[in-house]
Structures are given as C-alpha cells and as structure tokens.
Image: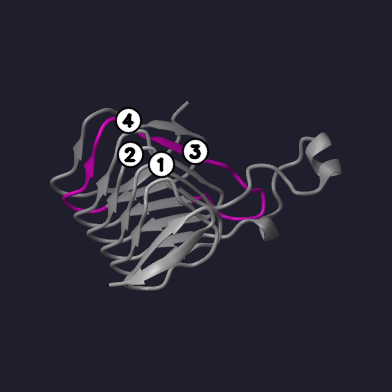
Amino acid sequence: MMQAICTHLGQGLRIEQLPYIRGNGELLIGDNVYISGKIGIGFASSPTRQSPTLRIGNNSFIGHDCMFQMRKNITIGNHCLLAGGIIIQDNNGHPLDPENRKANLPVSDDEVHPVIIKDGAWIGRRVMILKGVTVGENSVVGAGSVITKDIPDNAVAAGNPAKVIKAL
C-alpha cells in the first residue's frame, strides 16, 4: 500500500512511469525534475523518529531503475544527474548484531546515517552509495563505483571502494 506523503511535487515534473513506493515517508520533488523509467522508493519506519524523507532538488534527472532505501533522509541537490541502476541507502538494511538479525529486529537508529548528494553532482550508472556519505558539489562518480566515504566538492571518484582520481 502506497503511504508516501508527497508534500511538494514541483512544476514541470516529468515521470515516465509511476515509482514503486514501499512504506511510509515524505517525498519532496523540486521543479523541472525528470524521472526516467521506473524507480523504487523504500521508506522504512522507526518507532523513535519521524518518517523518512526523500528530497530531490530542482532541475535534477533520475535514471531508470534507481533505488532509494531510507530510514532517515536521502537528499539530492539541484541540477544533479543520476544515471540508471543507482542504489542509495542510509542504513545497512539489517542490524550488524547477529542476534538482532536472528530476532528479525530492525536496524537501530544509531546505525542510520543520512545521504547527501550536493548540487551539480553526476553519478554514473550502477553506482551504490552507502549510509552517511556526502557527494560533493559538482563531483562526478564513475560507473559501477561503491561510495563508502565522502567525496569532496569538484572531484572525480571511481572504484570499489570509490577513491578520488582527479580534481575538476
């Protein structure tokens, strides 16, 4: 059942297919956003905090088959380009503690860290961005990279794990 609360759907929004949305959360989409193909949005609830939020800034592009999994926040800035098949998550999906996994407990709040993609960033195809990462303003991330640590502003990063390979 779709329970997302769309508090802002910007002017000029173009969506090729309705996204798959699971869980309860807040979806804020800026002006002139283009969502190509079908994307997935997973909101995971937490008994101790407000509902999770996905923010997509103005003039951004989200490619087909992107997946957003969040318990707190994922923020995509203005003028961002996200190629297809990108996975972004603000938590590990399951607790690190094996006993908590066996008990089917959710990830604890201290294991959840927001993801921020700053204005002008370009994320290549099939990139995975893990919890707590900030991708810097105007930065470029090469296809197939796994981002485990912050990428500074105006940098090119690639690899698994992603490393800065060039300054812009």
**Residue range of the region highlighted in magenta in the rendering:** 30-52
Within 10 Å of disc 4 (Cα), the crowding (few <14, some 14-19, many 20+) is some
> Disc 2 designates what residue?
84
Q: Determine contact: label 2, label 1, CB under 8 Å.
A: yes
The x and y percentages for residue 17 are: 26, 28
- Seen at 77% across and 35% down, the residue is 104
The x and y percentages for residue 74 are: 45, 54
Q: Please indicate whether residue 130 sits to the left or right of residue 145 in the image.
A: right
Comes first in the chain, label 2 or label 4: 4
> Disc 1 designates what residue?
126
* Real-space CA distance between mark 1 and mark 4, rounded to the nearest whole angstrom: 15 Å
Q: Which mark is residue 38?
A: 4
Q: Amino acid at mark 3?
A: Gly
Comes first in the chain, label 1 or label 4: 4
Q: Secondary structure at mark 2?
A: loop
How does the figure colour the protein chain or chains? one colour
Within 10 Å of disc 1 (Cα), the crowding (few <14, some 14-19, many 20+) is some
Q: Which mark is residue 42?
A: 3
Q: Nearer the viewer, mark 2 or mark 4?
A: 2
- Seen at 24% across and 53% down, the residue is 30
Q: Amino acid at mark 2?
A: Gly
Q: Quadrant of residue 154?
A: bottom left
